[in-house]
Amino acid sequence: MTNELIKVDRVRSVDEALALEKAGADLLGVDLTPDPRFEDRREITVEQAAAIDGALSRASLVPLLELDDEPARILRIAQAMHARMVQPVRTVLPPAEVRARLSAAGIGIVYGGIEIAHDDDPGWVLSAYKDEPDLEVSFFQADVLPEYRDSWAFLRDQSPEYEEEFQIADLDDLAAGHPMLVGLDFAPVNVREIIENLPHVRGLVFTLAERARREGVRFHSYAEALGTIRALKG
């Protein structure tokens, strides 16, 4: 891996943030508006996010919020927690004016909500962004095969039997051409193997949750994420 970056989304307290930072997390996503995929109320206020930011010594926050709002308001929120990146809570392209204002302030965008299914054509994964100028992208964040609980084992053992299926090499090729953060079924028993097989991926993403509103949404409990990061970094 070119950069063993660890991002953990939906952090909701100072205690969680400090433990994750100590374990080795670099970026901590905070939901400033409800994530429509989940029903566990992990969203927090701007004031709570600022308190988390003030407690951190190394990691930085990535606020997840609606980016189709008034640019000055978005900028104020990001600057309140010294964020170097923001992330839309929905899979939408922020307006050009918002992107320009953020860029002028030195703030990039994490384009999340990207899901890669087992039968996806690699050429289509980032097609929504292909012809759009001035994306101001920091990372593309993709959840890989969220329809499978054992997504890594499926990629490693079953996908190679069918050449039309999405492959590990397809994911690494995407990452070679784009700054990619990826979500998989990370666990202490597989996280090092995943890193070794995806040398061009920029980092790993854990999404914290207790309950999803629908099937096919990947998440880790706080304890699972913390334990896996400690296994990787220890």
Image: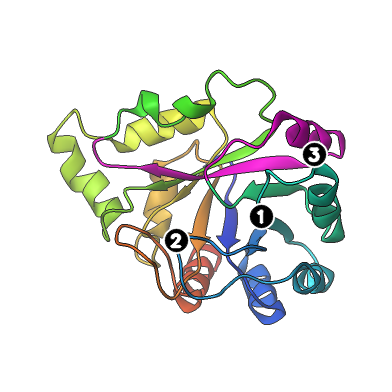
Q: Is residue 168 left or right of residue 42?
A: left
Q: Residue at x 86, y 53 (%)?
A: 76
Q: Nearer the viewer, mark 3 or mark 2?
A: 2
Q: Position of residue 128 (x, y in %)?
A: 49, 28
Asked if residue 83 is among those painted magenta in the image, a careful observer would answer no
Between 66 and 124, the one lying in front of the other is: 66
The range drawn in magenta is 91-119
User: Does residue 226 sit above or below 144 in this rendering?
Assistant: below
Q: From mark 1 to mark 2, how far is it between C-alphas?
A: 14 Å
Between 126 and 101, the one lying in front of the other is: 101
User: Does residue 124 sit above or below 78 in this rendering?
Assistant: above
- Residues tagged 1 and 2 counted as in contact (Cβ below 8 A): no
N-terminal of the pair, mark 3 or mark 2, is 2
> Can you say which quadrant of the picture contains the C terminus?
bottom right
Q: Amino acid at mark 3?
A: Leu
Res 19 quadrant in image: bottom right
Q: Position of residue 183 (x, y in %)?
A: 44, 52
Return the residue at label 2.
Answer: 37
Disc sitting over residue 65 in the figure? 1
Return the residue at label 3.
Answer: 102
Which type of secondary structure does the marked residue at label 3 adopt?
helix
Q: Nearer the viewer, mark 1 or mark 3?
A: 1
Q: Residue at x 81, y 56 (%)?
A: 77
User: Does residue 18 sit above or below 132 in this rendering?
Assistant: below
Between 32 and 150, the one lying in front of the other is: 32
Q: From mark 3 to mark 2, how far is it between C-alphas?
A: 26 Å
Other-residue count near label 2 (Cα within 10 Å), few / some / many at <14 / 14–19 / ≥20: some
Disc sitting over residue 16 in the figure? none
Other-residue count near label 3 (Cα within 10 Å), few / some / many at <14 / 14–19 / ≥20: many
Q: Amino acid at mark 1?
A: Leu
Q: Residue at x 47, y 39 (%)?
A: 199
Between 228 and 71, the one lying in front of the other is: 71
